[in-house]
Image (cartoon, rainbow, N blue to C red):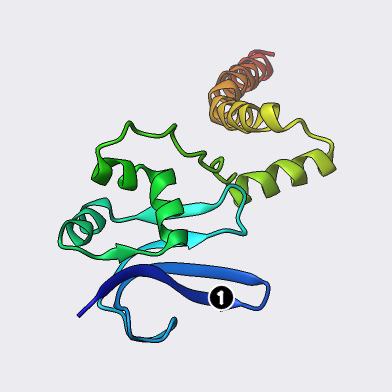
């Protein structure tokens, strides 16, 4: 049985997404696969390429023949050079990590309210600290009023 490493097309019209598969050479392009060894999404910027390197190396070592497009993908990841004993290619470009949607929303809401996003959080902490200090500040005032009332009551009794 001739085994090939090729692409299995998935996705929508004008939005191709591929799986890198190990399949019998006689099966259809989107037919049954022996094993799934990676994904390739060319429409993303930069393209998403994920390959199970150890499994690809195994299948190459037992004689699986990659298609031309798979050779190009494996050359970018360095698996083809590793199999052939060539020097490694430059590292792949990686997409920047996505921003936290909740934090972005809260920053936009604070900006719309007229608050500065960086100063909004410390202001809340300061407000909580003031609330915690207010009862302590009220007690001396209450004690002073109580003393005044007792002094006033004492003055009334003396006269």
Quarter of the image with the N terminus is bottom left
Residue found at x 43% / y 34%: 91
Q: Quadrant of residue 142?
A: top right
Residue found at x 29% / y 56%: 52
Residue found at x 58% / y 30%: 125
Give percent across and percent down for residue 40: 47, 60
Give percent across and percent down for residue 76: 44, 44
Towards the viewer: 101 or 17: 17
Is 19 positioned to the left or the right of 159 in the image?
Answer: left
Q: Residues within 10 Å of mark 1 (few under 14, many from 20)?
A: few
Instruction: Label 1: state its secondary structure.
Output: strand
Towards the viewer: 59 or 49: 59
Q: Quadrant of residue 127?
A: top right
Reply above or below: 84 against 31.
above
Residue found at x 84% / y 43%: 112
Towards the viewer: 114 or 50: 50
Reply above or below: 41 against 84.
below
Quarter of the image with the C terminus is top right
Q: How many marks?
A: 1
Is 116 positioned to the left or the right of 1 in the image?
Answer: right
Reply above or below: 70 against 34.
above
Towards the viewer: 44 or 117: 44
Reply above or below: 42 against 153.
below
Is 86 positioned to the left or the right of 95 in the image?
Answer: left
Give percent across and percent down for residue 152: 67, 18
Q: Which residue is mark 1?
A: 11
């Amino acid at each position: 049985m001739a085994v090939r490493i090729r692409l299995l097309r998935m996705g929508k019209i004008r939005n191709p997404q591929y799986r890198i598969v190990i399949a019998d050479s006689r099966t259809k392009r989107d037919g049954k696969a022996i094993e799934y060894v990676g994904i390739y999404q060319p429409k993303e910027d930069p393209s998403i390429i994920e390959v199970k390197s150890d499994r690809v190396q195994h299948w190459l070592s037992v004689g699986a023949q990659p298609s031309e497009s798979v050779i190009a993908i494996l050359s970018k990841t360095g698996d083809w050079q590793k199999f052939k004993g060539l020097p490694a290619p430059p590292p792949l470009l990686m997409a920047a990590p996505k921003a936290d949607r909740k934090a972005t929303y809260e920053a936009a809401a604070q900006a719309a309210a007229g608050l500065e996003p960086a100063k909004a959080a410390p202001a809340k902490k300061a407000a909580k600290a003031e609330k915690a200090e207010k009862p302590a500040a009220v007690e001396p005032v209450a004690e002073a009023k109580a003393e005044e009332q007792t002094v006033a009551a004492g003055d009334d009794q003396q006269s």
